[in-house]
Image (cartoon, coloured by chain):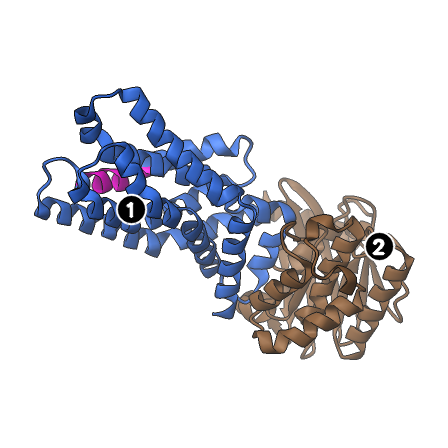
Chain colours: A blue, B brown
Amino acid sequence: MAAFLGLFRRDFGLALRQGGDTGLVLGFFVLVVVLFAFGVGPEAETLRRIGAGIIWVAALLAALLSLDRLFQPDYEDGGLDLMALSGLPLEFGVLAKTAAHWAATGLPLTAISPLLALAVDLDPATLPLLVLGLLIGTPALSLIGSVAAALTLGARRQGVLLSLLVLPLYVPPLIFGAGAVAIGADASTARANLLLLGALTLAALALAPWACAAALRQALE
Amino acid sequence: MKAAACDLAAEGIACRRGERLVFAGLSFRLMAGGALVLVGSNGSGKTSLLRLVATLIEPAAGRLVWDGRPVAADRAAYRAQLAYVGHQDAVKPALSPRETLRFWAALRGLPPRRSAPLIEAALAGFALEAVADWPCRWLSAGQRRRLALARLIAAPAPIWLLDEPTSGLDHDNQTRLEAAVAAHRDGGGRVLLATHLPLALAAADSLVLDDFAPGAGDPERERALAEHEARFW
């Protein structure tokens, strides 16, 4: 447990201290949403209809942006070898790193999403659903992304490969996350979407660390 | 050949990287307090052997034995005995040496109460007190190397696996390393290290890896290699 917390604390601390990670992700998230708002033009009606989708797509892209830094630095400086040899099973090591990734990206994204909802003129009544959806869904983004980050470790053009692998897998969270906030969705539709989103996150929590650890072991060979 | 209790032994191990056989038919035994120095030309497999003994790569043939039991039977118990310093330092530029050691000690499962005095001893052992709270991005290559070596003291383990531990170290620090290795061996620890520079190690065995390369001449080993090749392909 001490090892799990130690790893989480170090990775979270590094993400905040280097600034690059959390700051970059938030900046990117804000910019994409604002660009959409400018691109769609001044018609508030159109913007309101597609607003939730924009915020979710921007969140996916922002989460994707930081994934290549998840294992790459440890892989390059030999830290991954030491992680694999520590008393902590690699599956839990991966979980600690992924949790730190979420706390440094997914959580701040969720926290500033209400502000961006203003930019796309989202109905204030749907705001809790948007935030709740992001809170439930962003862990799945980090977990799914961790597998792809481990698989592409050491590859040339890792970033591009990573996007190609990860973005199709982000479709289900996108559908259910944006579906919960969609115009005309009644309470039961929203509830069903959020429950499915929760199921996705739980499934990713159960499967991703194992797949990710297996991919990392392969990379260390 | 049967290893006695509490021994680390390799029995006829072979290593294959891609399609190339790096070495084969290699055996050694490392007793409590023993040191084994790996020597050999570049590419003879010193790093591969260390990574193999660290269980980071699998032997293509043969097996490792720890405490009379094959390592493959209980890898986690064996890994708990290891401290590995590869030729990369695993130092994060944004953390200070003290934070780095605290983290590695925590990852080895040491509670902060126990690791705090060890960390101070590790910083002192490699003369890093003066820079202990600087971010590591300000450290020189030699200082980073010493920080990597200080892990050995901050998170103690009975088997040390050191890959070129002297690279980047000046003479004084090489002496510090020799002192740390001697203290470790006096306490019953084992050291397996690869190096190009002669280190002052009392009663250390050495293993010349070029002797185990394919085509190194020994007819007995050539036969073993041919058999291995025949089975593999």
From the viewer's side, name the closer residue of A94 and B65: A94
Is residue B51 found left or right of A3 in the rendered image?
right
- The correct choice, above or below, for B38 with respect to B186 in the image is above
- For residue A134, which numbered disc appears in the image? 1
From the viewer's side, name the closer residue of B70 and B37: B37
Q: Which residue: 44% across, 39% down?
A: A25
Amino acid type, residue under disc 2 in the picture: Leu
Q: Which residues are magenta?
A: A169-179
How many numbered circles does the render carry? 2
Label 2 residue SS:
loop
Q: Which residue: 18% across, 30% down?
A: A49
Instruction: Categorize mark 1 by other alpha carbons within 10 Å: few (<14), some (14-19), many (20+).
Output: many
Is residue A178 found left or right of A94 in the rendered image?
left
Is residue B29 found left or right of A36 in the rendered image?
right
Which chain is disc 2 placed on? B
Q: Are marks 2 and 1 on the same chain?
A: no
Residue A171 lies in the magenta-colored region? yes
Label 1 residue SS:
helix
Residue B40 lies in the magenta-colored region? no
Amino acid type, residue under disc 1 in the picture: Leu
Residue A56: x and y, percent?
29, 37
Q: Nearer the viewer, mark 2 or mark 1?
A: 1
Which chain is disc 1 placed on? A
According to the image, label 2 marks what residue?
B169
Q: Is residue B58 visible?
A: no
Is residue B94 found left or right of B162 in the rendered image?
left
